[in-house]
Image (tube, rainbow, N blue to C red):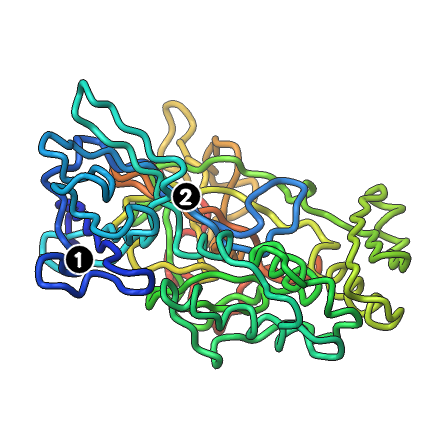
Amino acid sequence: MSFEVRTYQVLITPLVARDTYGTTTDVTKDVDITDFVKRNGVGSIKSGVDNNDYEIGTFLFSDLKLKVLNPFGKFNDQNDPRSMFQYTRDLAKIDIKLFSQDTTSTTNFSGIINEEATRQNFLKGEVEFKVLSLGSILRKTKVSGGVVSTGVTFSSAIKTILNQTDITRVVNYDVSKISVDYDGTIDNGSYFDNKVAKDALDDLLLASNSVLFIDETGTFVVKNRTDNDGDILRLYGPHDLDGRQNIVDIKSYNTGFHRIFNSIKINNTLIEDNDLITEMGMRRKTIDLEFVTDVNTETDIANRILSEFKAPKVEMSVVVATETARTAKLYDLVSIKSPLRATPYTGSYLPVFDLAVFDTDVFPYESGAIDLHETTAFKIIGFKENPAKFTTEIKLRQRGLGFDDGYYSDTEGVFDVGRFDSAVFK
């Protein structure tokens, strides 16, 4: 059964003390403020990894703007006795849930108010909140001196930085969800003294060839860029033979040359793929990591990054109904079948497929720019949700590391059986 999206619900939980969210009798958790949200007052929700062209992303970060009506001062700061914010407006938690016709809900965004970017219009009685993802707490937390020691591994340092009270009061921490792709050793722990936690983690994630995001349970996850096991999200274009279209639009299709790096320099250590440089031209990425001085570690880091980004991988964005993407997660697999449009010769009978005889039977004209076949394997690297239109733009990158490993095998269950592969008559 398919469900039609009905509405979004906006919930807020204020702080009532420095480390305590909404536990007093007059300020409870998950206060429903949906009735105060302006029409189209929930801005686009954008999140992703490796979303900037020519860059290697490591950290999933999202934010949105939330506009609410404030005729009675309910959303003023803590200095107004009418305000629901007893302690501070900064860091209050916001949850945005998507409801379907069957009344089930999923949390599509969890974040915290950024007081620095909050703006009020007194004449209109409105407040515009800038709501940052829960992970933005890392921008407000520092790494104390001596917390990261010389000689510890990258993963150990990441765990130590994430498992701080100032951070875990906002985001859950589970040591079993922290796993890096390459676990090198830190040669200079003092490099991290008094750094902003976000900056320290960016360096460690880049060195370990890993990414950080927050899962649906509100818990930190650190992992490599490998796609997730599980069901494959199957998407279909407008000319699918069986009329299964669930793609609204396909945007920004490219061959992946913007994210090729075939020459990696870590400090003074240079690792290159000369064959690919000859074929595609040199694309160098220079990275300074002051906490690493061992040449072997530098070489290992360079080799991991080179392996990850040396080959071009197709990238694109597909727009679907938010309901279609409702359970999709970062690094889930996606298959796309968007065939060309086929039309018969003018005035002739319909063309013949399958057992047609060459130079005897009539074949169709095919029109359209690109034939996307379900054999190409994509993984999700980003989302952009539009609450006003109930649509979500999913950013995709072809999976794999080399030139020939970005495709599904015949055992992965994405192939149609007994149907035409490439076209539909129109």
| Front position among marks 1 and 2 | 1
Q: Residues within 10 Å of mark 1 (few under 14, many from 20)?
A: some
Say what amino acid the circle numbered 2 marks: Lys
Residue 25: percent from left, percent from top: 9, 63
Counting every numbered tag in the picture gives 2
> Mark number for residue 242?
none
Q: Earlier in the sequence, mark 1 or mark 2?
A: 1
Residue 424 visible to an observer of this rendering: no
Residue on which the image places disc 2: 46
Q: Residues within 10 Å of mark 2 (few under 14, many from 20)?
A: many
- Residue 276 higher or lower than 305, as above or below: above
Residue 395 visible to an observer of this rendering: yes
Q: Which of 138 and 377 is in front in this view?
A: 138
Q: Which of 326 and 125 is in front in this view?
A: 125
Residue on which the image places disc 1: 30
Residue 270: percent from left, percent from top: 89, 57
Residue 172: name its quadrant: bottom left
Which residue is drawn at the image coordinates 71% and 63% (left, top)? 207
Look at the image and tell me in which quarter the N terminus lies. Answer: bottom left
Which residue is drawn at the image coordinates 23% and 58% (left, top)? 16
Say what amino acid the circle numbered 1 marks: Asp
Which residue is drawn at the image coordinates 85% and 41% (left, top)? 281
Quick one: SS at disc 1? loop
Q: Is residue 243 left or right of residue 309?
A: left
- Residue 203 higher or lower than 43, as above or below: below
What's the CA distance linking mark 1 and mark 2?
23 Å
Q: Nearer the viewer, residue 108 or 262?
A: 108
Which residue is drawn at the image coordinates 73% and 60% (left, top)? 305
Residue 175: percent from left, percent from top: 48, 79
Quick one: SS at disc 2? strand
